[in-house]
Image (spheres, rainbow, N blue to C red):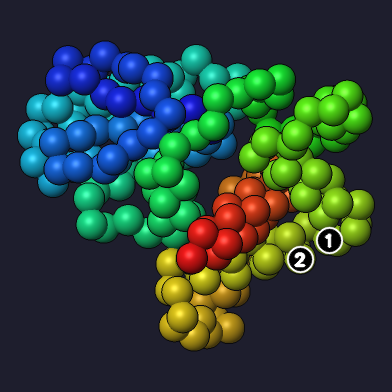
Amino acid sequence: MILYSVGVRGGLKRIRKADFKEDNVYLIDDFKTIYVWFGSNISKKRKDITINKANLINEKKEKIANIQIIDQNKEYGAFIVIKDFLSKGLKPKKAIERRAELKIQIEETMELIEAGLNPDLEAEITIAANDLSQKKKSYKELCETLAQLQLKLLRGSKKTSKDEIQIKTQEIFKSSSTYEELCWLIAQLNVLDKKKSLDY
């Protein structure tokens, strides 16, 4: 995950922490999804410049990402957890760099841990994703699990109906995500949600 502050003319500055104020614009590259967050005071012109910048970044990717536009006080889904996490700040990267595509590289991660490095957030997600992939669940089961997690984040304590889960599952199923990508996304939400719970 890479966090950028977006300037008035569309310039990107890589940062580690976001305060999500009304005059700010942020671009979060989560590799499979590019989130663009706008504060409530941002003009249409500045929004257009930022969206164009997000499209340019997306065009350079080997695999096109989804672009989600998020307005202040209208956050939803997985971004609720991501926002909370970014408000506290990303830790400096030590040894593990996120790959261009979502692939589980457990061997590389375990080598670093065995060398004495404490696992960072990405390492925790990699380990959790690998553990999930080893359970050999069906593709449909993974889609349903991810759907339930996303709806839980969106609805909070509100009960989600079976129909809503089924509709969301079908949306994910049609997204053509790979098996490893689904494992990664599920692990990512679980780890971030767990960290959020421990903070309270």
Q: Residues within 10 Å of mark 2 (few under 14, many from 20)?
A: few
Residue drawn at point x = 69 percent, y = 52 percent: 187
Q: Given the image, on which type of amino acid does mark 2 rest?
A: Glu
Residue 45's place in the image compared with 59, above or below, is: below
User: SS of the residue at dot 1?
Assistant: loop
Q: Give how far apart the Cα atoms at labels 2 and 1 are.
A: 5 Å
Q: Given the image, on which type of amino acid does mark 1 rest?
A: Ser
Q: Where is residue 155 shown, x and y percent of the image?
A: 43, 74
Residue drawn at point x = 27 percent, y = 24 percent: 6
Please indicate whether residue 114 sits to the left or right of residue 75 in the image. Answer: right
Residue 162 seen in the current view: yes
Q: Which mark is residue 138?
A: 1
Residue 3's place in the image compared with 182, above or below, is: above
Q: Where is residue 19 shown, x and y percent of the image?
A: 28, 40
Residue drawn at point x = 77 percent, y = 47 percent: 129
Please indicate whether residue 147 sits to the left or right of residue 6 in the image. Answer: right
**Extreme residue in the front direction:** 116
**Residue occupied by mark 2:** 141
**CB within 8 Å, label 2 to label 1:** yes
Image quadrant of residue 148?
bottom right
Residue drawn at point x = 90 percent, y = 58 percent: 135
Please indicate whether residue 37 sits to the left or right of residue 28 in the image. Answer: left
Q: Where is residue 22 shown, x and y percent of the image?
A: 15, 43
Residue 20's place in the image compared with 117, above or below, is: below
Q: Which mark is residue 18?
A: none
Please indicate whether residue 66 sits to the left or right of residue 144 in the image. Answer: left
Q: Residues within 10 Å of mark 1 (few under 14, many from 20)?
A: few
In this rendering, the count of numbered labels is 2
Residue 150 seen in the current view: no
User: SS of the residue at dot 2?
Assistant: helix
Q: Where is residue 13 shown, x and y percent of the image?
A: 34, 17
